Structures are given as C-alpha cells and as structure tokens.
Amino acid sequence: LTATGSPATSATLASGVYGNVTLDLPTTVNPGEFESLTVGNTNETITFNAGTYIFDGSGIDVNATGTTLTGTGLTFYMTCGSGTTPASCGTWTPSSTQPTGGTCSSTNSSGSEVQMNGSTTLNLGAPTGTNPVLFFFDRCNSNSNAFYVDSQGVTAGSGYPTGMLYAHSGGLQINASTSSIPSPLLVGSIDYNNQSIVLGSATGSVALTSGTSGPGTLVN
C-alpha cells in the first residue's frame, strides 16, 4: 500500500496476493487476490482499475456511509478457500438440457460475499462484450447473503452498474429501497424487506411488493 501526502490523503494498492485489507483512505486498487477488502471510513471513494479481483475469505465489506465504488472493465470472483488459497466451493455438474442449469455436490460451501453495510454508490462496470459479468459467485457458493444491501441502500450514477450478478447457489438480500442492483440477475434466491425495489433495467424490471421473503428461486 503506497500512501500519498503528508499526512496521507490517498493511497494505491498494487496488484498482489493479500489477506484481510482495510481501506481507511480514498484508494486506487489494482487487480489481485484477497481474503477480504473492507471500507472503514465515511465518504471514501475506492477506485478499482480494470481486471479480475478474486476473493476467497469473507469478501467485500462496505462498513461505512457515503462510500463510492467506481471503475470499469471489472469482474469480481467470489469463491471459497483458506487464507489466500482460493478453491472451488463444491463440484459443479452442468445440465445437459439447460444452458445455465446444473447441480452442485452435497459438499458445497458458503464462500465470499459482498456486504453493503452503509450507504453506497455503485459506479462499477463489467468488461465490454457479450453477456459481461460484474459479480461472479462460484456456482457452488451457497452463501444466503452472497450480495447483501442493508437499510441505508445502494445508489448508482447514470448508466451504472453494468454487468451481470451471477450467484447460482447464493442469495440476494435487500433491506432498502433501491433500483441499483447489478443486472441481468441470476441468483439462487431473493429475500427482500422493502416495497420499493426494482430488479433489472427500466424496460425489463421486476418490481417487488413489501414482504419479508422474496419469490424464492428466481433461476436455479
């Protein structure tokens, strides 16, 4: 981690293999492998340079208000593992009849997650191309809170976020009014607790009514 200024006002995190990292300054992050990445101070902007980010521990935790996550050409891969050694969360067997279908072994595990525990602006974009993926959770990552939004909610700038949120065995947990969830969306389950949630784009959205649990399996 290279800090700029005296006292430090910003920082840059070079590409590499890391354990648990807490960012207490506005930081530019380069692609790498992480156990976890935590935003610890209010009103920080975290800039991700283009590339693939692998998480094999607890994952991404925005634990402060007024956070902006920004960057384009990104894929976040949320998997299982021990320490800084990523591993599959289970054995995936593709379906012979459904292009996106398949099953996991009975030993599938709960892996890395994305936790938005403070008000967050999600100005993130996947790589360009056909069906780009922004957040890819290992197909056998069975974390029921794979992508979690607390009551402070998620917003986004115009045109963001872009790219699919793919969590075949994982869950989407939403506790706030929002229309800024990455889409297209392919998840194992949705749990919501707000009457003003929109999933998908303005022309192909699913508006959800108030309730303590979602429609169950969206795609499986």
Image: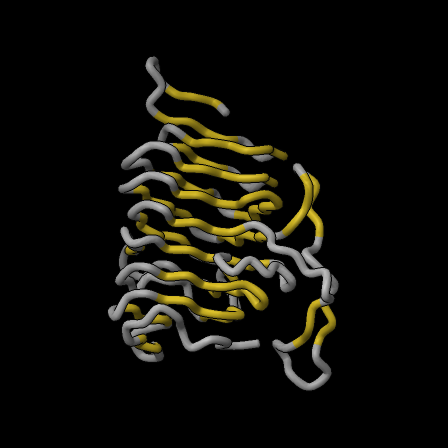
In the displayed structure, would residue 12 be above or below residue 52?
above
In this view, which residue lies farthest toward the top? Answer: 6
Q: Position of residue 63 (x, y in %)?
A: 37, 40
Instruction: Using residue 92 as the reference point, say whether residue 116 is left or right of it.
Output: left
Q: Position of residue 133 (x, y in %)?
A: 52, 62
Question: Toward which corner of the image does residue 204 lie, by quadrant?
Answer: bottom left
In this view, which residue lies farthest toward the front? Answer: 212
Residue at the (35%, 52%) spot, across then down: 123
Residue at the (36%, 61%) spot, across then down: 174
Q: Nearer the viewer, residue 27 or 98?
A: 98
The number of numbered badges drawn on the structure is: 0
In this view, which residue lies farthest toward the bottom? Answer: 97
Q: Nearer the viewer, residue 110 or 94?
A: 110
In the displayed structure, would residue 28 be above or below residue 155?
above
Instruction: Using residue 75 as the reference point, say whether residue 198 is left or right of it.
Output: left
- What kind of colouring is applied to the model shown? secondary structure
Residue at the (59%, 61%) spot, across then down: 142
Q: Position of residue 64 (x, y in %)?
A: 33, 39
In the displayed structure, would residue 136 be above or below residue 64?
below
Residue at the (32%, 36%) spot, across then down: 44
Q: Position of residue 136 (x, y in %)?
A: 55, 59
Q: Quadrant of the C terminus?
A: bottom right
